Every structure is written in structure tokens, then in C-alpha cells.
Amino acid sequence: MANIYRVKDLPADERPREKAIQFGVETLSNSELIAILLGTGGSGRNAIELGRHLLKKHDHLFALSKTHWRMLAHEPGIGTAKAIRLSATFE
């Protein structure tokens, strides 16, 4: 899977949206769920990798959900719009 940077370059059965349609949202990992919320990646990471990075940096989903949007906006690849989207979802 090296050199695949965009989710749309992944096989259809590995894309979060398509997996959710085929198998149900409950089958997605937290990083895949975050990828759907983010919509796109950034800073050399696709949306799934970006979600995985956020979860790892904040240790778990609960800690990420309590992170202020201004802090999230400073994460490479996030920015204000994605930070607000995440914070609004967690709220």
C-alpha cells in the first residue's frame, strides 16, 4: 500500500464510505469514522492516516473529543474548518 496517499486510490472495499454502505457504520474503526468527518487528508496523509494520527497523538477518542478546536486547528492537515467539524461532531 506504499505510495497511496488518497483514500479514493484505495480499493473500494477499503474506503470508509463504501465500507459503511456495504457493511454498516458500526464496522468502521475510529480512524475510518474520523476520516469520513474530515473528508480529505492533508500534509502528506490521506484522511484515514490523518484520523489515525489524531487518535495516536491524543491517546484515544475520548481525549480527542475533549480537545479544543483551536488546538486541533494547529495539527498539520487539519486547519480551522476540519477542527470545527470535529468539535461540532463531538459536542
Image (cartoon, rainbow, N blue to C red):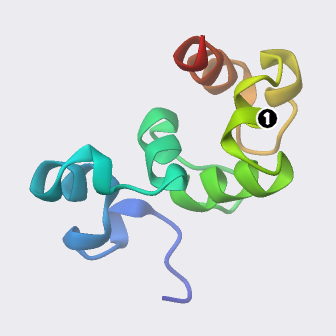
Query: Residue 82's spot in the image, x, y percent?
Result: 62, 26
Residue at image position (41%, 62%) is 7
Query: Residue 83's spot in the image, x, y percent?
Result: 69, 23
Pick the front one: 16 or 81: 16
Query: Residue 39's spot in the image, x, y percent?
Result: 45, 39
Residue at image position (61%, 62%) is 49
| Viewport quadrant of the C terminus | top right
Residue at image position (46%, 57%) is 29
Residue at image position (19%, 49%) is 24
Inspect this view and state whether residue 8 appears. Answer: yes
50 relative to 76 in the view: left or right:
left
**Where 10 falls versus 65 (above or below)?**
below
Inspect this view and state whether residue 43 appears. Answer: no
Query: Residue 28's spot in the image, x, y percent?
Result: 37, 55
Task: Report the number of numbered marks.
Answer: 1
According to the picture, the residue beneath numbered tag 1 turns out to be 63
Amino acid type of the residue that numbered disc 1 sits on in the rendered structure: Ala
79 relative to 19 in the view: left or right:
right
Q: Farthest residue toward the left?
A: 22
Mark 1, Cα crowd under 10 Å, few <14 / some 14-19 / many 20+, is few
* SS state under label 1: helix
Q: Farthest residue toward the bottom?
A: 2
**Where 82 falls versus 15 (above or below)?**
above
Pick the front one: 50 or 21: 21
**Where 88 falls versus 35 (above or below)?**
above
